Amino acid sequence: MTLLRRISNSFKRHGLKVSLLKLYIALVDHWFDFRHGTDTCRWMLLQNLNISSRNKERGVRYEPARIVLLRKMFECMTPMLPTGGVMVDLGSGKGRVLLIASEFGFREARGVEFAPELCAIARNNFARYKESTNTKTVFRIIESDVVDYAIRNDDNVFVMFNPFDDVVLSKVLENIASSLLEYPRRILIGYYSPQHNETIARHGGFAPVEDVNFWGYHFTIYSNAG
């Protein structure tokens, strides 16, 4: 769907004030790509990508998280953790979340993505972004199904933009919990546009510490410690 068409539909559904806010949010996204020469705005359907994972049907199309909301989420997260941490975006697409994470002092930003085409675009985005900024953050993309990602002892922030269904989410939560048993530490999970909060509640190992509705967008932050 084109930007103009989305704006038109928004005016019909939400009225002038909300639509102007959504327009501002969309312009921030497009300005970011224009400024840095990156490609993060364009949506992509999974059926058009060469994904070999058994969980392809459990995934969701690539749709970028809004930059304004990502910044709001990281602003809420960073005071809860020591500086210089490691952020992992599970279902990282073109890498937008990693790029925005670099604005908040993360030592490393890792993306886990099972679509090779999206991984290639993300790597190109990282190179272009590094050329246009002085970021010290190290960007890494891991081409893998998220259920097969071996969580590392220094991974302490996980971000998800509703990238997969509850079955995959349950396995991801088990993997995070296993990592915490092996190497106890405080972690945060930022769940942007959450669709399966009940799955996290059933797991029982993570409690919500922040639940934010911001200009019609929603994210929940979970932690294993109060």
Image (cartoon, rainbow, N blue to C red):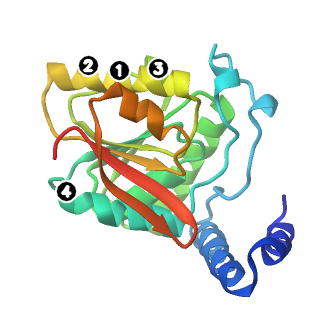
Q: Which residue is mark 4?
A: 80
Figure check: 216 above or below 150: below
Give the distance between the C-alpha atoms of the residues marked 2 and 4, in whole angstroms.
Answer: 22 Å
Q: Position of residue 198 (x, y in %)?
A: 46, 35
Question: Residue 174's mark?
Answer: 1
Give the distance between the C-alpha atoms of the residues marked 1 and 2, in whole angstroms.
Answer: 6 Å
Q: Is residue 47 left or right of residue 122?
A: right
Q: Are marks 1 and 2 in contact (CB under 8 Å)?
A: yes
Q: Quadrant of residue 12?
A: bottom right
At label 3, counting other C-alpha atoms closer than 10 Å, the crowd grade (few under 14, some 14-19, many 20 or more) is: some
Q: Nearer the viewer, residue 219 or 113?
A: 219
Q: Is residue 154 left or right of residue 168?
A: left
At mark 3, the secondary structure is: helix
Q: Which residue is mark 2?
A: 178
Give the distance between the C-alpha atoms of the residues marked 2 and 3, in whole angstroms.
Answer: 13 Å
Give the mark, 4 or 1, whose residue is nearer the N terminus: 4
Could you tell me the amino acid type at mark 3? Answer: Val
Give the mark, 2 or 3, whose residue is nearer the N terminus: 3
At label 1, counting other C-alpha atoms closer than 10 Å, the crowd grade (few under 14, some 14-19, many 20 or more) is: some
- The residue at the point 79 percent across, 71 percent down is 13
Could you tell me the amino acid type at mark 1? Answer: Glu
Could you tell me the amino acid type at mark 4? Answer: Met
Q: Position of residue 28 (x, y in %)?
A: 59, 75
At mark 1, the secondary structure is: helix
Give the mark, 3 or 1, whose residue is nearer the N terminus: 3
Could you tell me the amino acid type at mark 2? Answer: Ser
